[in-house]
């Protein structure tokens, strides 16, 4: 009897992990995509198995020990936790971000399963936008569209109030306030470019009224399914530079001052998974996910990071 | 005592002591506060600070730099949100600022209650230097509460410089 499922996109998945149990777990996880999965245990076998259509899922320790691995032509490189699939070492996550990795999964099961499957399917199907990919079906999504740049504070206050209103703790409300504030500020003041590619609103007075029309429209959405709280902010400029963002996310930890560029780093520091979805010159969407099931200490101290770019061959 | 409002931050000044309450955000410019405080050692209480974003943090850093050039700065009852953000910046690590007390999110393993008790950083200096949080009593059931987050998020400012 022939199966009735429609064939998926071309390509294969390669899992590279030295631990046999982790190999089995990862094979099961990504096997849910019904995409062919090849398992390897070391760097040489990994490089031999990877081609331009491959999504490579690599033990973070192996990734860290192999500088330049992500430069190898592939559809995408995804680093996952190492020994026993326990939470990744925060220092290794930071090092991979500094090295420009576009996909770093930091957390153990079951978050690993949820995050990895969503990541692989977003890459395979090239469907990148929307917080719905991270939230269980049935959870309602609430949306706010800013009519004026000065409505940022109201949006943040309303969001925090609504989040606490559904029963999430004050600590989560406080974190989500900072995340939404920084992402909205980024969308309102850093996303717009003039004809000289200058971020001409970067120094604009924040108390100034500015009606938002056309490309200046900014939306914020959120949803929770009692596993995650997801906050999504979209602008219609698509000017964020993902290749430069990863390194900047950890800048606050090493910088001797806070003289600028800390907004996204602060939002990253407040969440458990930070996702950038980009269609260049069309839309930037940033999704911050907070896990609301576990104590922070049961997860990795650094957040996972993912960047997805629409229609860019060889996307990282 | 003098009362000021800087952006959305309320400031009470009494001699060399300032008490801050409200938001450290885009609207705050703390240069005025630096000029209002007398030269020499100062103390700042931030228990009432409820929100800090990256621009507010930049102003806070500039204020502390300016005050430290004139004398010692002691921070009292540092609010939870400010404490977390100060720990993100290497500038504040390793005892670079004197913190007399601070608030942190604690979780009770017995009843699940979350609270932000005030931790006396002088009394508990020895354990804080070891990046360990002292247990605090749960306000609901009385059991010992534990720090709800990674020690690095709150206590990096106390660790000795490497």
Image (spheres, coloured by chain):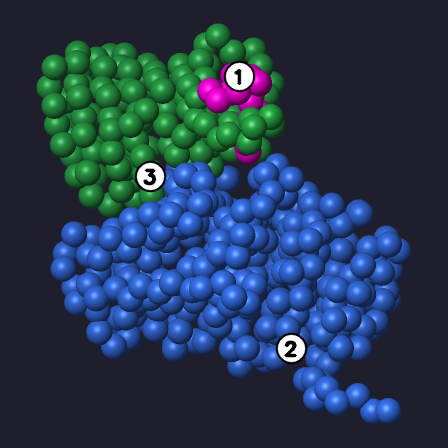
Near-viewer residue (A112 or A243):
A112
Q: Would you name the residue on which mark 2 appears? A: A124
Query: In the rendered view, does A40 fall on the left or right side of A123?
Result: right
Residue at 48% x, 8% y is B123
Chain that the image shows in blue: A
- Is any atom of residue B52 visible in this view? yes
For the record, the magenta segment spans B134-149
Chain that the image shows in green: B
Residue farthest top in this picture? B123
Crowdedness near tag 2: few (<14), some (14–19) or many (≥20) residues, C-alpha within 10 Å: many
The C terminus of chain A lies in which quarter of the figure? bottom right
The N terminus of chain A lies in which quarter of the figure? bottom right
Q: Secondary structure at mark 1?
A: loop
Marks 2/3: CA–CA distance: 39 Å
- Is any atom of residue A176 visible in this view? no
Answer whether residue B140 is magenta in the image.
yes
Which mark identifies residue B52?
3
B20 above or below B119?
A: below
For marks 1 and 3 on the same chain, the one whose residue lies earlier in the sequence: 3
């Amino acid at each position: 009897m022939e199966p009735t499922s429609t064939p998926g996109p071309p390509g294969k998945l390669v899992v590279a992990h030295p631990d046999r149990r982790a190999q089995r777990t990862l094979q099961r996880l990504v096997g849910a995509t019904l995409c062919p999965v090849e398992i390897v245990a070391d760097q040489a076998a990994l490089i031999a198995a990877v081609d331009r259509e491959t999504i490579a899922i690599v033990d973070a320790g192996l990734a860290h020990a192999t500088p330049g691995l992500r430069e190898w032509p592939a559809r995408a490189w995804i680093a996952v936790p190492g020994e026993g699939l326990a939470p990744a070492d925060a220092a290794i996550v930071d090092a991979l971000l500094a090295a420009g990795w576009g996909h770093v999964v930091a957390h153990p099961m079951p978050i690993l399963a949820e995050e990895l499957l969503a990541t692989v399917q977003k890459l395979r199907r090239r469907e990148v936008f929307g917080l719905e990919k991270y939230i269980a079906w049935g959870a309602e999504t609430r949306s706010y569209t800013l009519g004026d740049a000065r409505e940022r504070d109201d949006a943040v206050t309303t969001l925090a109030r609504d989040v606490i209103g559904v029963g999430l703790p004050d600590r989560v409300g406080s974190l989500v306030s900072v995340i939404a504030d920084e992402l909205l500020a980024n969308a309102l003041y850093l996303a717009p470019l003039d004809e000289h590619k200058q971020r001409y609103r970067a120094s604009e007075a924040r108390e100034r009224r500015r009606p938002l029309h056309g490309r200046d429209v900014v939306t914020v959405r959120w949803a929770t399914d009692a596993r995650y709280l997801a906050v999504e902010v979209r602008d219609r400029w698509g000017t964020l530079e993902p290749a430069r963002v990863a390194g900047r996310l950890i800048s606050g930890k090493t910088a001797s001052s806070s003289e600028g560029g800390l907004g996204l780093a602060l939002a990253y520091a407040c969440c458990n998974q930070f996702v950038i979805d980009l269609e260049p010159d069309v839309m930037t969407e940033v999704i911050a996910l907070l896990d609301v099931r576990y104590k922070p200490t049961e997860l990795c101290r650094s957040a996972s990071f993912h960047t997805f770019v629409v229609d860019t061959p060889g996307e990282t | 005592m003098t009362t000021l409002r800087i952006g959305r931050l309320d400031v009470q000044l009494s001699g060399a002591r300032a008490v801050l309450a409200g938001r450290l955000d885009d609207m705050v410019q703390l240069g005025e506060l630096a000029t209002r405080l007398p030269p020499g050692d100062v103390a700042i209480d931030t228990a009432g600070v409820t929100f800090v974003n990256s621009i507010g943090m930049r102003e806070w850093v500039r204020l502390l730099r300016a005050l430290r050039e004139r004398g010692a700065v002691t921070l009292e009852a540092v609010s939870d949100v400010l404490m977390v953000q100060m720990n993100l910046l290497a500038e504040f690590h390793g005892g670079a600022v004197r913190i007399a007390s601070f608030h942190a999110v604690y979780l009770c393993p017995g009843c699940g209650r979350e609270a932000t008790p005030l931790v006396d950083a002088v009394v508990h200096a020895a354990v804080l230097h070891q990046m360990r949080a002292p247990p605090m009593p749960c306000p609901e059931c009385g059991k010992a509460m534990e720090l709800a987050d990674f020690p690095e998020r709150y206590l990096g400012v106390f660790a000795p410089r490497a």
